[in-house]
Amino acid sequence: MTAEAVQRWGSTLDSVVVYEQGAVCRRLARGSVPPDGRVRVTGLPRSMDPGSLRARVTGAAGMRVGEARVEVEAQPLGGPAPDGPAQEVERLQDVVAAARSRRDRLTGLIEEIGALRPVPPTRRREDPHRRTPVDAWLELADFVDERLTGLHTRLVEAEEELLEAEHRLGIAVDRLARASTDAPSAHVETTVSALLVIDTSGTGHAEAEVELELEYGVPGAVWVPTYRLSHRRGGSSGRLVMRASVAQRTGEDWRGVSVALSTADLRRDTGLPKLRSLRIGRRQPASVPTGWREPPAGLAGLFAGYDAAGPRPAATAAPGTAGSVPAPPPPPAPQGYGGAPVVGGRSPESYGTPVPAPSVRARTGAPAPTAPAAPGGAPPPPVTEVPAAGPPQPSGDELDYAALVLCGPDDEAGRRGRLFPGSPFDPVAAEHRRRAESVAALPLPGHAVRPRESAGSFDHRFDTAARADIPSDGTWHTVTIGEVPVGTDTEYLCIPSVEQTVYATLVLSNATDQALLAGPVDVTVDDDFLLTTALPTLAPGAVRRVGLGPAESVRVTRRTHLRESTSGLRNNTAVLDHRVHMELANRLSVPVDLEIRERVPVTSDPDVRIEERPGWTAPENGQGPDRHAPGTRVRRVVLPPGGTAELDGGYEIRIPAGKALVGGNRRS
């Protein structure tokens, strides 16, 4: 199936499902099926997972895809390389290197000129002492000062030029890091396509217009939920707009696609286990796996012409590239399929027979026996293995037809032209996938939570309301999912014994059948932005509270008074009378439901009595954040718009004289 003999169809990206990490893309292609049914669909990204390709025919009864595989084509660009962020970075790197070289050269000249010193000639023993010519010293000093002045001026200009070039290079590098990866290479044009064979035997006619649907998985896509809440003060409902921050670096821009967001793990294995049947009765032999055939005749002479051409020239690595490309993995275990070249997607009967290597393992799968060492430490003679009788027994990996790889002419003699389990190593595709997976380390927005962490043991899917554009630049982009009605109720809380500040709390209730995941929420009250806070996970039918911060329009003032006295026939009981007076004020235009919390002492001594003043009740003790400390008392007051109120409270502590502490704290 050559590129010239196969009809090419273009494809368009229609929809994307973004998972916790990674995405599943769906492409559509349309065209007339040729008589042989072979079609090449182009437009696939380089970072795709080849084993995830799925193809089917839509809207045409009787047609199906009989074979599907991925092929990569590369050819050098004929014209000059297009200008882009990468070329700009390379150009500015040369500019910075040249500016740094000029700066270093001037620095070296300054060091050389500054090291100039007058050196008197060598005086012989019989020569008399000479006077040093002062004019020569002064001329040398003037020469050094003049040259250093000029060189320092040029050095300042060179350093400024270097700083400006480095600044431009930093901007270009940042622009390249934020640029879309959906761009052609500077020197090589790479095309990833899907080769399909469409079976039209069920329709009775060829040359039919059909639509193909291709689905494949790609790494390098993440998302987190975000929200915007709008409500009115005093209202019982609000509008919660669910959004999502999506970042992707898959190598292709998503333009005008339908986006769905899922909390599921795309890499989780969902294969069903194989359950063996239990039979009651006589023992029956295990069924022999099928899907093999004997190697074709003449397989040994398939590469005779290739061998006659001589050895291939050794590949020489370019200077400075050592270690840049990882080495290919070692060859798989020598258990292979003989037969003609076969690709994934065909019937099992078209695959070859597993042929074990005679030097490693017999057909029975038992390890080769080890001969005793010869006298004198010589290595033992090789052991000749006898193949087991009967047909070979392929393993589960050898029956995974999609994972079989055809060994080429450069492999070992016993492997050439045969199918073995494994996958070919593509260093270019591995580099694309490595760059794509780097988006998982992107810093999260404020208050954001990974969807897998907030979803718990359930998986949810959210479909966006409209198509969206998300470039492959590795930065966060916001898309709107939809609007969810929620119930709202604003409560106000104050603990004046700790802090005389009133805090507002928004009570959210989810009456829909859609779960709301944890994430940041922008709260808008009466069309005015209030704050950005964290929204907890809100399951269907659940009620949660969201803190809104201090409410400056509601004030609470607390005053206390302590009066000490004695009681009893002999004044043998100390009475500590704690009186609390509070003044409440509401400056809002809506009623305020204010909750005041106080605490009374708790004693375990039956002789010490604590008498509370009426009007305060003990709250119901809950779990977690709703759990109250012992001695907590609560009182709720509804303040009208612009209204005020006064509250009185307190308690009396009666302590017998024998229980009192001299000099102790008698006020709490």
Image: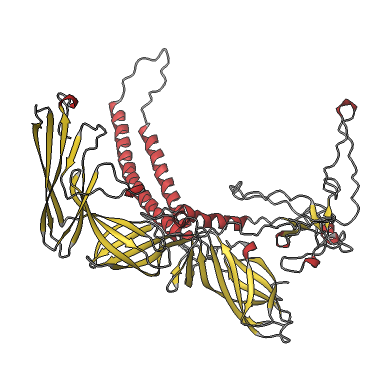
Q: Position of residue 474 (x, y in %)?
A: 46, 59
Tell me if I can see residue 217 in this picture.
Answer: yes
Quadrant location, the N terminus: bottom right
Q: Position of residue 585 (x, y in %)?
A: 12, 56
Q: In this orientation, which residue lies closer to the viewer: 124 or 198?
A: 198
Left or right? Give the position of 42 relative to 264.
right
Q: In this orientation, which residue lies closer to the viewer: 233 or 227?
A: 233
Q: In this orientation, which residue lies closer to the viewer: 126 or 559?
A: 559
User: Residue reaching furthest top?
Assistant: 126
Number of numbered markers:
0
Relative vertical location of residue 256 with respect to residue 600 in this rendering, above or below: below
Quadrant location, the C terminus: top left
Quadrant location of residue 570? top left
Left or right? Give the position of 459 relative to 158.
right
Quadrant location of residue 307? bottom right
User: Residue reaching furthest bottom?
Assistant: 205
Name the residue: 24% across, 37% down: 602
Tell me if I can see residue 182 in this picture.
Answer: no
Q: Position of residue 141 (x, y in %)?
A: 30, 32
Name the residue: 61% across, 68% down: 191
Left or right? Give the position of 273 relative to 226.
right
Q: Position of residue 112 (x, y in %)?
A: 40, 35
Colour approach in the figure: secondary structure
